[in-house]
Image: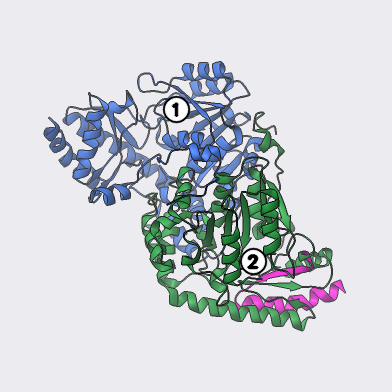
Chain colours: A green, B blue
Amino acid sequence: MPAFSRFTPLINALPATVPFVGPEAIERGRGLAVKARIGANENGFGPAPSAIEAMAVAARYTWKYADPENHDLRQALAEHLGCGADNIAIGEGIDSLLGMIVRLVINPGMPVVTSLGAYPTFNFHVAGHGGRLVTVPYVDDRENLDALMDAVRREDAPLVYFANPDNPMGSWWDADSIVAFAKALPETCLMILDEAYCETGPAGATPAISALIDRPNVIRTRTFSKAYGMAGSRVGYAISTPGTAGAFDKIRNHFGMNRIGVAAAIAALKDQAYLGEVIEKIRASRDRIAAIATANGLNPLPSATNFVAIDCGRDGAYARSIVDGLMEHGVFIRMPGVAPLNRCIRISTGLESDMKLLEEALPQVLKTLG
Amino acid sequence: MPAFSRFTPLINALPATVPFVGPEAIERGRGLAVKARIGANENGFGPAPSAIEAMAVAARYTWKYADPENHDLRQALAEHLGCGADNIAIGEGIDSLLGMIVRLVINPGMPVVTSLGAYPTFNFHVAGHGGRLVTVPYVDDRENLDALMDAVRREDAPLVYFANPDNPMGSWWDADSIVAFAKALPETCLMILDEAYCETGPAGATPAISALIDRPNVIRTRTFSKAYGMAGSRVGYAISTPGTAGAFDKIRNHFGMNRIGVAAAIAALKDQAYLGEVIEKIRASRDRIAAIATANGLNPLPSATNFVAIDCGRDGAYARSIVDGLMEHGVFIRMPGVAPLNRCIRISTGLESDMKLLEEALPQVLKTLG
């Protein structure tokens, strides 16, 4: 069927590819059922019961739009983080915030620096706004801060993306190195410090809020999708100076937040005891995944996230065959998209029932592959 | 506080104004409590109990992202509408879809045709992408189809926005006139036919789906926010040819939909009996609002929506003072933004308790104003 004939040249040039294929699409496409959903770095331990209760209460008020200023959530986050509410912008998940940041900064042809194999959805937004990706290889499965800085300077790039802890590798940098990087960055370059996984990292891996809060060229992005277990709620937030955080107001969908998600996020934030319990479960599950990998002759990498990257010791085709093979057993996992990261598979933490399915399926798949 | 120094020139030129101030912000700003929330065209009759139940069930699965293909909702809508699932794109409310449509079509400086005083959020998105608004006055409080067509041709505009039924005036055109307009439109102009309020219109006001489904340059937008009573759920959809509907995939947030909202929308769609009851309540409430207006010497305009525009017989300042005065009594309403529409106030349908508050407050406000 024909499409409208006058989309912008940029739109016409964009591919129809998507950053990620969802597990539901894999189920439909391959006629398989996902039994262990441990591929999208969701959190099967789920949100706090208090958050679920807040969702049920908020359901009665879904006839109302959410407060377009997100006042209560921003206040709650400010108190939790120790900053001002005007340091915070709310968005429909980090993905939405990333799209807006790219739009705020990038005109077609402008360079954007990121690591080769880092977050595909960020790259999707860069492409969507006509930006030119300048990529820097990982070193030792970690983003290369020095090379990122070199690329920013060489290209006079207005935007650099850096995730800590990192996805898809699970690696991390210490807070001091990150703060030093941010402070050394030209003020003409905006740093996205994506901290989607900050809650599950080790002590010392996340800079204090105060360390970067006065820097107009740093935006830290965080989410309720990972440790808080609410990926389906679509609540993310950005932390920056009031001036930079306020820029989102120029373009965001002011009535874009769903009311139940916002209410649940406020409740979840209050329940730090539950969050602490979940983080312990995630750490235990990381160990469990690592043990399963090791028992099968594979090499789990250290992880600061709610997933473990596992070096399978061969090329991307081999790792892909493991991913596909596990899916035959109903075990949904993913893998990095580019070499050399794609020698790995990536398995999200989950319930013991998920781990048992993985434990049973993995040796069978490896045996079949030989 | 300073902002990042290198936002795009377009971003720097955008105002910080927002399309609408929410009732919560009015409450905070003026130290008043909203008792009757009948200003944002929300639906106080609320979603179907079956939809609320679906929300409660879905709350247990918020640890999962929603299906990025929105398969089940698109299938359900396709069956309901009598078209293909590939004719449908899902978005986080019509607002989000409008933003994406503008982005698909408009480069800075390009003309966009709409009616003077029509949907401010659409204008917000046009400004946000650097489009140049070309506005056509309403005639007899209705959008002027002939003048819109003239403006499209004169400007060689790639985009025209038309709402039927209309917001903020509640007026409407018959289906035949709209279909004729769409068919006469140059194929180089994309028509947004915003049907946010289509469920509450009279028979014959909404074109059949089949009447426009083969036109690549028509996108119809609809929502679960109005008649379905789920504004806080943020579920809207667009209907077009598969080619045009598929263009959203190039730029949308594939994981942007909240899981509870999608589940609720599917449940709400199944419960057409409940929808029918609500529509009857909305119609009765329109009559009630009209009666209150008439009893106070004001002139209610005919409405095909879940609100009534009321001609207050003087200028915008007078209407504004009524809006502000009602808020002093806890009655939140709104009004059109530009002359001559702003001689009116706009009151959303609601529960009898809301109507009673309106009925009590309005004569007091008018008496004070003299």
Query: Which quarter shows the C terminus of chain B?
Result: top left
The residue most toward the right is A370
Q: Position of residue A136 (x, y in %)?
A: 73, 58
For label 2, the crowd category at 10 Å Cα-Cα, with few meaning under 14, some 14 to 19 and many 20 or more, is: many
Q: In the image, is residue B152 above or below residue B130?
A: above
| Secondary structure of the residue carrying numbered label 1 | loop
Which residue in the protein does label 2 denote? A166
Which residue in the protein does label 1 denote? B205
B189 or B38, which is in the foreground?
Answer: B189
The residue under the point 28% across, 52% down is B28
Residue A59 appearing in the image: no
Question: What segment carries the magenta color?
Answer: A342-370
Residue A17 appearing in the image: yes
Q: Position of residue A257 (x, y in %)?
A: 45, 52
Where on the picture, by quarter, is residue A281? bottom right
Name the amino acid type tagged 2: Asp
B258 or A170, which is in the foreground?
Answer: A170
The residue under the point 80% across, 81% down is A297
